[in-house]
Structures are given as C-alpha cells and as structure tokens.
Amino acid sequence: MAEAAEKKSWLNRTVLGVGLTSLFSDWSHETATAVLPAFLAAIGAGPAWLGAIEGIADGLSSFTKLAAGHYTDRLKHRKPLAVFGYAFTAFATASFAFATHAYYVLLARVAAWLGRGVRSPAKKALLAADVPPGAYGRAFGFERLMDTVGAIAGPLTALWLLEATGHSYQKVFLWTLVPGLIAVAAFWLLVRERPIAARPQRSFLLGLKALPVPFRRLLIGVGVFGAGDFSHSLLILYAARVLTPSHGLARAASLAVGLYTLHNVFYAGSAYLSGWLSDHVPSRKAVLAAGYALAGVTALLLCTGTSSLWLLAVIFVLAGLYVGTEEALEDSLSAELVPKEQHGMAFGTLAAVNAVGDFVSSLLVGFLWSAFNAQIAFTSSAILFFSGALLILRLRASQ
C-alpha cells in the first residue's frame, strides 16, 4: 500500500511545475546555444573564444550557486529567489541580440549563468522537499527529461528561425525571451513550498562543514569527472569542422545542429530511465559510475578524428546518454545523502563543484584544441572521465 501511494504521489504539482519550467527555460537558452558557435564565427571569434565564454560563465556562476545554496537554507520562502533567477536568465540570454563583439557575448552569458546560479539550489530544494526519498531518481530524472525536451525544441526552433528570418541571429536571440518568460510564469504558478524542519542559522563555513562525509566524498568524484566534462557547444563545433570538407560550410553547420538535436533526444530518455533505474537498484552510485565510464568511451571515439556521419551520430548519442545519467544521478544521490534542511547548501555545493569543473574543462579542452589538436584535447577528457568513474566505484565500496 505504501509503495502504491508513493507511485501516485511523486508526480505532483511541484514536480510538474519544475519540469515545465525547465522545459521552457532550456528551450530558451538552447535556441541561443545552437546558433552561438556560428554567430561567434560571423563576428570573427574562434574555438578559444567559445571555450572561454562557456568556461568563464560557468566558473563565475559557481560562486553564485554556493552563496545561493547557503542563503536559500536560511530563507522562509525559497520560491521568489528561484523566480528571480529564471527571469534574469531570460533577459540576459535575449540580450545576445545586441552583441557586436565576443566581449559582449561573454558579459551576457555570464549574466545569464549568474541567474542560473541564483535559482538552481532553490529549485532543487523545493523539488526534493515535495517528493518521497524513494522517488528522488524519478523526480530528478523527470525534471531532466522535461529540461531536455526543451533542449530538443531549442535547436529545431533555431533552425526554423534562421530560415524564416533570413539567417538573422539577432531575431533568433530576441525570440528566446518568449519561452524564457513562460518558464518564469510556470514556476510561479505551479511550484509549491513544503514546510521543513527548523534550520539552524549557521555561518557559510559551518554550513559547509556540516555537510555529511559521504556527500563530501561524492563531490570528489564529481569534481574529477567535471574537470573533463567539456561544454557540448564544442561538440557542435567539432562536428561542423570535420564535416565541412565533404559537405560544405553551410551544410556542415546544419548537420551539426541536427546531430545535437539527436544528442538531446537520447539525453532526455536517459535522464528519466537512469533515474527510474536508480530507484530500483540497491545502490544509485553504480548507475552514476556507469554513466561516467560511458563518457570516457565517448571521448575516446572523439579522439579518432572521424568524419563519418554515422560514427558522429553514435558519438552524439553516447554523449546524450552519459549527460542524462550524470545529471539525474548526481542530484538524486545528493538528495539521498543529505538531510532536507541542508538541501540548499548541498545542491549549491554540488552545482559549484560542477561549475568549477565546467570552467576548467572548457578552458582546458578549448586551449588544447587550439594549441595542439582535438585528439589531445579529448584524450585529456577521457582520462578524467574514467578517473571519476573509479572514484565513484571506490566510494560505493567504502560505504
């Protein structure tokens, strides 16, 4: 009877609201991301700029996520903070339309990702507070699924808008404001707050120290993996470059966006399925370690330098599978290992570790690619991916 009640209760108004918000918010910024490499090329910026923009935005965002995680555990109401973050991201993303130099894109991306930093811990804490612990995998997997439906719609919308507007990047960027503001409304109207236990008013450092030891050990594996987890904007750029000699510049760019859409389809499916699986196996950690190992296989395939469209499709599929598993399992494991009254700090710390990893990986892979070649860049990622998987397996064996 208890299991039946849980199955009925986990997909509730809050889970649906968070899911719809993620769908429309991701639709907004993935539309912008899909055309960002081509837009940067049009204004004379190369792969090093793309890596720097993604890496610096993620790195600075990490400080916001840490602060927001600590702050949200002290708030009586977390919801307004999340709503503000979604609105700020929507306007910052649309402001790409006014960029005439890569510096402007960098500033706008930083602003958008600071908004993500503000909202992320509050959103995840509100979600975890409104579902039973035995359904964390499904709840966070569903949120990732909906997020990725938006990520599928984004590149498709970008392609359609480019054709409809005569390849006007400015109009594409301005259009992102529509789904961005729908996301704000969905969160405000649907997500509810659940009362939780009284939260001690700790200082920031004491809040960090109070996080459980198993969670801190998990962060080590997450950090090592994240140091190799390059932005998938670089994956789009890689595909476009290797396909250009045989397909031409314009056709290669369209094929790269199509491959990214395929990536997002498998990302969506794996997010929910891996979360569902983790709710039905003895240890969630084994599922996460498998996802990390799959990332290592993906990076090794990238090292081949293939220009085969079919092998590129396999690479993009594997990349989608590992990202969906990684994101759903890191969140649900964190929710499981940390008491609910510390969820804001836990999710903020996890997001910060991931953001620092994104900062390091985007700069590292972008630099190695520009200074040497793509094979060296992706080999470094493969080493870090497999190292992260081994750390997660050791964590599993030690507890």
Image (tube, rainbow, N blue to C red):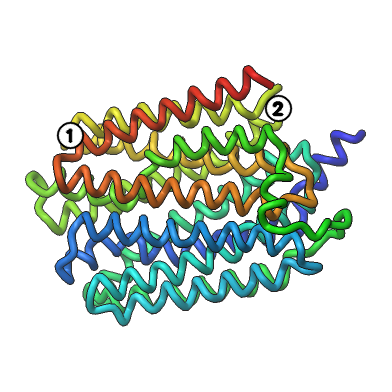
- Please name the residue shown 34% across and 40% down the image: 316
- Of 346 and 100, nearer the camera is 346
Judged left or right of residue 19, residue 377 is left
Rendered-image quadrant of the C terminus: top right
Disc 1 from disc 2: Cα separation: 38 Å
> In which quadrant of the rendered view does residue 126 lie?
bottom right
Look at the picture and state if 91 lies above or below 373: below
Query: Image check: 383 left or right of 73?
Result: left
According to the image, label 1 marks what residue?
305
So how many labels did they put on this image?
2
Mark number for residue 280?
Answer: 2
Mark 1 and 2 residues: CB-CB less than 8 Å, in contact?
Answer: no
User: What amino acid type is highlighted by mark number 2?
Assistant: His
Residue 355 at x, y = what percent?
47, 52
Instruction: Find residue 221 and name its label.
Output: none
Residue 216: x and y in percent read: 63, 37
Q: Which residue is drawn at 71% across and 43% down?
A: 211
Q: Nearer the viewer, residue 202 or 323?
A: 202
Report x, y in % for residue 160: 32, 67
Secondary structure beneath label 1: loop
Position of 33 with respect to 332 (left or right) is left
- Is the N terminus in the top left, top right, bottom left or bottom right quadrant? top right
Which residue is drawn at the image coordinates 39% and 34% (left, top)? 318
Neighbour tally class for label 1: few under 14, some 14-19, many 20 plus, Cα within 10 Å:
some
10 Å crowding of disc 2: few (<14), some (14-19), many (20+)? few
Measuring from the top left, give residue 194's x and y in whole percent.
83, 59
Q: Does any portion of residue 335 appear in the rendered image? A: yes
Q: In this view, does 169 lie above or below 238?
A: below
What residue appears at the point 34 percent right and 73 percent down from the top-left corner?
172
